[in-house]
């Protein structure tokens, strides 16, 4: 009997210093089943370990970005203790502390865990067909991968409560106005726009970009005074790098800087 090849659930492409990761389980609307989550976590870990990758873009194949958790796998979590590791924990932990910026390129639905996945990225670009929802209350549960926290941080309490308590989807224009996504473009321009933005980010000093992203991510975890101390610490670290010296020298000389990441 011929052994069937293992299906790739997450593909990886390189576009210069940008890694493009695509969820490839379109038949299930890229639902976050255990196998897909494991493969995506591995792809992200590999990209993080590659010194030539400066930005990661995440998108979904087919008509959806990600439909959320695989409902068939949810009952297995019943009875788990709050301290138990759930199947998606590692994925969201990796994204929370990712060493390079992450950009979500969203077309179609981003529901439940799919919305949480977009929220876990640093920036989201949406196509006009994009729809975002945290519909867990309609199933008798609540978001479990950061939705109640990151959504409030992204759009504010009132708009987050509207989404969380109604479970109703919102469109791309509403999501952009609310602050859930940065830009809205035509569907066929979502990935090119995300790659173009990622390329511009990758052209900046890598350590400065990483330090700026880290300080901004910490803004919601710290009181303002501590956040300002973090910013000062990161500013001085960046100022001591070779790239800072190169950037200042290039600016003075009127030339394009050649950043090395040192």
Image (cartoon, grey):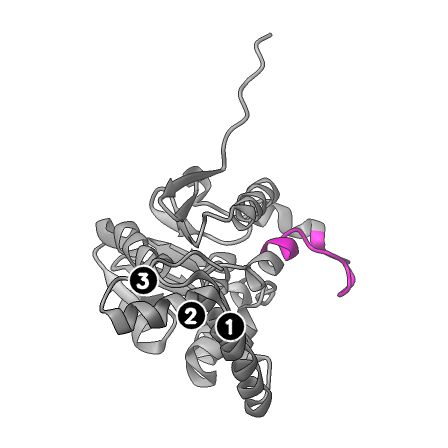
The answer for how far apart the CA atoms under marks 1 and 2 are is: 7 Å
Which secondary structure type mostly characterizes the magenta part of the structure?
A: loop
Say left or right for 44 vs 246: right
Residue bounds of the magenta highlight: 77-91
In the picture of the structure, the residue carrying the numbered disc 1 is: 240
Task: Answer with the quarter of the image where residue 40 lies.
Answer: top right
User: Is residue 134 visible from the viewing direction of this image?
Assistant: no
Q: Is residue 11 left or right of residue 139?
A: left
Identify the residue position indicated by label 2 in the image: 244
- Picture coordinates of residue 118 (x, y %)? 44, 61
Q: Residues within 10 Å of mark 2 (few under 14, many from 20)?
A: many
Q: Neighbour class for label 3 at 10 Å: few (<14), some, many (≥20)?
A: some
Q: Which residue shows up at 55% across the image and 76% down it? A: 218
Task: Quote the CA–CA distance across marks 3 and 1.
Answer: 16 Å
Q: Are marks 3 and 2 in contact (CB under 8 Å)?
A: no
Q: Residue at x 46, y 47 (%)?
A: 52
Residue labelled with disc 3: 257
């Amino acid at each position: 009997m011929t052994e069937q090849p293992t299906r790739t659930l997450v593909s990886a492409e390189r576009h210069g210093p940008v890694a493009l990761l695509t969820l490839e389980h379109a038949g299930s609307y890229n639902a976050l089943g255990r196998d897909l989550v494991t493969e995506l976590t591995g792809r992200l870990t590999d990209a993080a370990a590659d010194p030539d990758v400066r930005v990661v873009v995440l998108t979904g194949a087919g008509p959806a970005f990600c439909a959320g958790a695989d409902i068939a796998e949810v009952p297995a979590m019943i009875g788990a203790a709050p301290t138990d590791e759930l199947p998606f924990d590692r994925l969201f932990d990796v994204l929370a502390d990712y060493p390079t910026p992450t950009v979500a390129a969203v077309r179609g639905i981003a529901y439940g865990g799919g919305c949480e996945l977009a929220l876990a990225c640093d920036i989201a670009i949406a196509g006009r067909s994009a729809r975002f929802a945290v519909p867990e209350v309609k199933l008798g549960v609540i978001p479990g991968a950061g939705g109640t926290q990151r959504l409030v941080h992204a759009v504010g309490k009132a708009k987050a409560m509207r989404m969380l308590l109604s479970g109703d989807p919102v469109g791309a224009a509403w999501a952009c106005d609310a602050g859930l996504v940065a830009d809205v473009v035509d569907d066929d321009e979502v990935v090119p726009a995300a790659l173009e933005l990622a390329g511009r980010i990758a052209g900046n000093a890598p350590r400065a970009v990483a330090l700026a992203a880290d300080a901004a991510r910490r803004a919601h975890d710290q009181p303002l005074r501590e956040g300002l101390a973090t910013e000062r610490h990161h500013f001085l670290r960046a100022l001591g790098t070779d790239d800072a010296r190169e950037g200042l020298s290039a600016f003075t000389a009127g030339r394009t800087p050649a950043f090395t990441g040192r």
